[in-house]
Image (cartoon, helix red, strand yellow):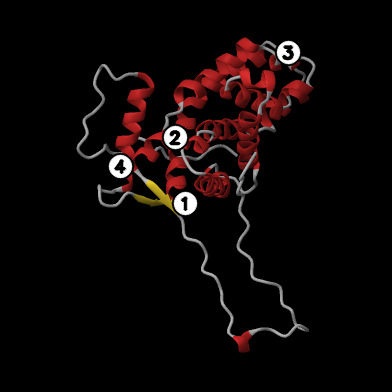
């Protein structure tokens, strides 16, 4: 399935702040614009800067879906041009272009690139809650009923954070791109295997991820604090304690991906 997204990424500006000046360019200006939009999006003033984690993640994913929809056409063109130079038979071409939801893979990369910054901004408990919400919501945002996108997001996060030795010299965007190519099976087809090791191609495919994904969480963290509602504990009165012979199964929370460590 393809992405079905609405881009709410340009709605509003921070109260009391002006637009970035001409001297504020690049990532600094992008961070300011994101900060301005966030303030109006959540409608908070200086007295209340709390946002529930699930709402923060919902707005984050909407913003990333808009980014992915904007960047994907040019990214897809680069990939298609590279594949056009490969001698593919009918079955190989069908497998690459029809069997893989590449736009969803790209959306996963956009989400992973920005999500990888969470641990540098939040406490382990806060980051775990946000990661859990991302795992719970990201597939639905991509209009999928399976876990293709969430699985890929956390696979990319693991590769970004757990690289060792020479792997640490590779940029996050390169790891994300390589993961997409591997997921497509590029390395399993003789005529396309060379693309997996083509550093120049991976750099071209990684450039939109490196330069086009806004610093959403940095802007959010600068203005808001997150909270979440823990389920209320259930206390039994003495006369409500079940008999040992019945021993019903304990009530359980709905399982959700937590991702404390990759």
Task: Determine whether label 2 and label 1 are within 8 Å by CB.
Answer: no
Foreground label between 3 and 1? 1
Task: Determine whether label 4 and label 1 are within 8 Å by CB.
Answer: no
- Name of the residue lying farthest toward the bottom: 239
User: Which mark is drawn over residue 6?
Assistant: none
Q: Residue at x 36, y 45 (%)?
A: 224
Q: Earlier in the sequence, mark 3 or mark 1?
A: 1
Distance in Å between CA atoms under marks 4 and 2: 18 Å
Q: Which residue is mark 1?
A: 54
Task: Determine whether label 3 and label 1 are within 8 Å by CB.
Answer: no
Q: Crowding at label 3, few (<14), some or many (≥20) Cα neighbours within 10 Å? A: few
Q: Earlier in the sequence, mark 2 or mark 1?
A: 1
Q: Which residue is mark 4?
A: 39
Callout 2: SS: helix
Q: Which residue is mark 2?
A: 66
User: Which mark is drawn over residue 194?
Assistant: 3
Instruction: Residue 42: give x, y in percent of width and height.
Output: 33, 47
Residue 8 visible at all: no
Residue 56 visible at all: yes
Q: Crowding at label 1, few (<14), some or many (≥20) Cα neighbours within 10 Å? A: many
In the displayed structure, does residue 107 sit left or right of residue 151? Answer: left
């Amino acid at each position: 399935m393809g992405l079905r997204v609405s881009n709410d990424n340009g709605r509003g500006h921070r109260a009391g702040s002006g637009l970035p000046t001409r001297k504020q360019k690049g990532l600094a200006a992008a961070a300011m614009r994101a900060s301005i939009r966030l303030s109006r999006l959540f409608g908070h003033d200086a007295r209340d800067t709390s946002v529930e984690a699930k709402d923060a993640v919902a707005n984050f994913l909407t913003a990333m879906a808009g980014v992915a929809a904007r960047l994907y056409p040019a990214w897809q063109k680069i990939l298609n041009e590279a594949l056009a130079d490969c001698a593919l038979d009918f079955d190989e071409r069908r497998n690459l272009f029809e069997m893989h939801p590449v736009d969803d893979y790209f959306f996963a990369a956009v989400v992973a690139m920005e999500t990888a910054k969470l641990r540098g901004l939040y406490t382990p408990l806060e980051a775990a809650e946000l990661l859990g919400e991302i795992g719970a919501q990201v597939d639905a945002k991509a209009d999928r009923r399976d876990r293709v996108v969430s699985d890929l997001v956390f696979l990319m996060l693991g590769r970004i954070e757990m690289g060792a030795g020479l792997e640490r010299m590779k940029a996050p965007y390169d790891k994300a791109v390589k993961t997409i190519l591997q997921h497509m099976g590029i390395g399993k087809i003789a005529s396309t295997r060379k693309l997996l090791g083509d550093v120049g191609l991976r750099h071209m495919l990684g450039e939109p991820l490196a330069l086009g994904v806004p610093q959403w969480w940095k802007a959010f963290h600068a203005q808001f604090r997150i909270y979440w509602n823990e389920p209320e504990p259930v206390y039994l009165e003495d006369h409500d304690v079940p008999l040992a012979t019945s021993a019903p199964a304990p009530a359980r929370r709905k399982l959700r991906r937590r991702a404390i460590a990759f």
